[in-house]
Structures are given as structure tokens and as C-alpha cells.
Amino acid sequence: MKICHLTSVHPVRDIRIFHKECVSLASAGFEVHLVAIGTEGSFSEKGVNVHTLNIKSSGRISRITKTAKQVSRYALSLNADVYHMHDAELLLYSGLFTRNKKIVIYDVHEDLPLQITAKHWIPVYFRKPISWLAGHFEKYFVKNLYGIVAATQPIADVFYSIGKPVIVIRNFPMLHEFKTINRDSPVSGLLCYLGSVSKVRGIKEVIESLTLSSSKLLLAGSYSPEGLRAELCTMSGWERVEEFGTVDRNKVKEILETASIGLVTLLPAANFIESLPIKMFEYMAAGLPVIASDFPLWKEIVEVSGCGICVNPEKPKEIAAAVIRLRDDPELASAMGARGKAAVLEKYNWKNEEALLLEYYHSIKIGEKS
């Protein structure tokens, strides 16, 4: 079976797309291709045939009308048996594949309608109608595809009624990345946050809490929007932030070895409440106790495994109190970190999800109608 993953949005070496799904399929013996935006041309890495297209887009509309179309056309030229799409905008061009009797899978990373309700660049009064349209858009195009891979159970629930094969493949950590992490001498009370930096992800509340707890934060990720950084710099807790920008996996490892507490205090936006943030599970895999938002799903994970403390993410005082508690009780912090790591080794890891992905692909029979 020849498989082609394609994305017009995500980076070439996206963790879920490249390092997890593509590499797992290639290791299982499938011929795997990946088409993405980049400047490296065509090359092979970890058994995956990568094709990068140097396409310049002048904004979101251009990305949808130009970039997504060119990515789709190039992918079709590879004449794969199965096409695995990772972006909603690629659905517009799914007909290119279905008309050529190709099997098409849609990988839904996030709940698109809920995600739109939190987009800062969409005027508030337009978000609800655009969200409604996005939901109908997805379902309309998915009806003509083979099936859906969903990143969470709530996302999968949206698509069951369509009558297509749906599978949940969660974005859990790859165990091998954390085997060599050395946490013999983390800095007591040193916090870390990995991922996109935005208001809705609770960054302002975290920075405000730093002054209350007299703690320091290692911050790695890109700002959204870019102008947010200038606003954060005016906050009194900013002098306690050490920022790294976008980092590679080696730097992620270094940060996880140095910090003693991992933060994932996203605000209660609709698309976050039932999400499974990879950063939380990476903190756990590295043996860090976590301070997480008190969403019901997250509380169940954190409290059942005993790996951290859940707080109201909108209250800096609660974040600070949790930090102080873990900093002042290193035995508690160590025990929580150990329990989180054990939970990842047993349950929350990519090895388990990989088995589900391979089973899904092995069930596909070439020649079936998409």
C-alpha cells in the first residue's frame, strides 16, 4: 500500500504527522510519502519520502485557494493508494482524489467549529455563524471520504453519524524521547511552559502568578499574535521569564530536565475543555508534576494518576499557591512526577496509539470506494 500524508498548514516535521503517524506507518512496511510546505525539496528521512513545496502565500485566503490546491495536485501526482489529509482546507480539493478512485482519510486534530470560537482575528460577532458554517462544511465533504482519524473522543463523536469508519488516535508522547531525560538535579520551583503562547492559553495569568510565588518561568513557543510579546513585557512578572522562542526537540529535553514543575493552565475556551494537550503528557513522561486547568477531563487524568494539582486557570493566586505547595514539599513533587511517568508508561503513550493506527490501515482494502 502506498500512502501519502499531506498538509498545507503544519511544518514538515510536525510531531503528530511526521514523527508519529508517518514514521510508524513506514516502520510497519508501508510506502509512505509526505507533502508539506518547505524549501528542502524531496528527500527521505526515517523511511518517509518527504516532498516540500516552496509556495508563498499572502494570507489565509491565499493559503486556502492557492497553497492547499497546489499541495493537493502535487500529492495526486504521486499516485498513492491512500491519501491522509491533515487540514480542513484540503477538503475543498478532496474531489481531486475521490474522482480518481483514491481512498481519502481526514485526520481531525482539533474541533474546528469550537476552535473558530476562540480565534482572536475573527470579530466576535462573526465567530458563531462562521463556526456553524465550518461544522457543516466538514460534514459535507467528509461524506465522500473513506474515513476519519480523530485526535480525541469528543471529536470522533461528531463524525459517527456520517457512517464512515472513525478511529481515535490520541497525540500521546513517544516513549523513546524521554528514556534519556536526566532529572537528577532540577531547579526547585522552576516552572516551564511549552507550546503556543497566547492569552487564551493563560499566559497572562501565569506571568501574574510569578510575582506571587517568587518563581521563574522557562517559556518556549511562538507568540500568537506576534504583538502579544510587547504586551507581556509590560507586566511586573515578566522579569521572571526566560524565553526561548520556538525550540527543537533537543531543547525541549533540556528544559524538561531543568524545570521542576510543568504548567498547562489553558483558559476555559470551548475547544480546550475536552482537549488532550500533548504538553501535559510530555511533562508527565519527563517525570514533572503538573499544574493543570481544572477542566473535568483534565482533573480525571491528573487526579486519578496523582500526578499534579488542578487549579482555576483564571486565578493567578491559585496557580501561585500550587507552585508554592510543590516547591515547599519536594517529596510530594517527586512522588507526583513519578506517578505521572508511570501513567504514561502504562497508558498515555504513542506505542498504544500506533497499534490502533496500524490496525486501521491494515483494515483498508485497496479498491474500496472512498
Image (spheres, grey):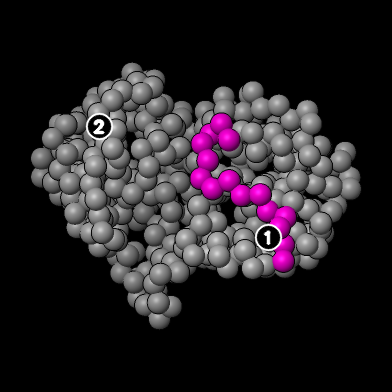
Give how far across and how far down residue 232 sits, in percent.
61, 64
Rounded to the nearest angstrom, the CA distance separating label 1 from label 2 is 40 Å
Vertical placement of residue 98 versus 230, above or below: above
The residues colored magenta run: 236-251
Quarter of the image with the N terminus is: top left
Q: Quadrant of residue 239?
A: bottom right
Contact between labelled residues 2 and 1, with CB atoms less than 8 Å apart: no
Helix, strand or loop at label 1? It is helix
Q: Quadrant of residue 120?
A: bottom left
Q: Nearer the viewer, residue 204 or 244?
A: 244
Vertical placement of residue 158 versus 22, above or below: below
Give how far across and how far down residue 117 sits, in percent.
44, 69
Q: Residue at x 57, y 28 (%)?
A: 177
Q: How dense is the environment of label 1, judged by Cα within 10 Å: few (below 14), some, or many (20 and up)?
A: some
Q: Which mark is residue 238?
A: 1
Q: Which mark is residue 254?
A: none
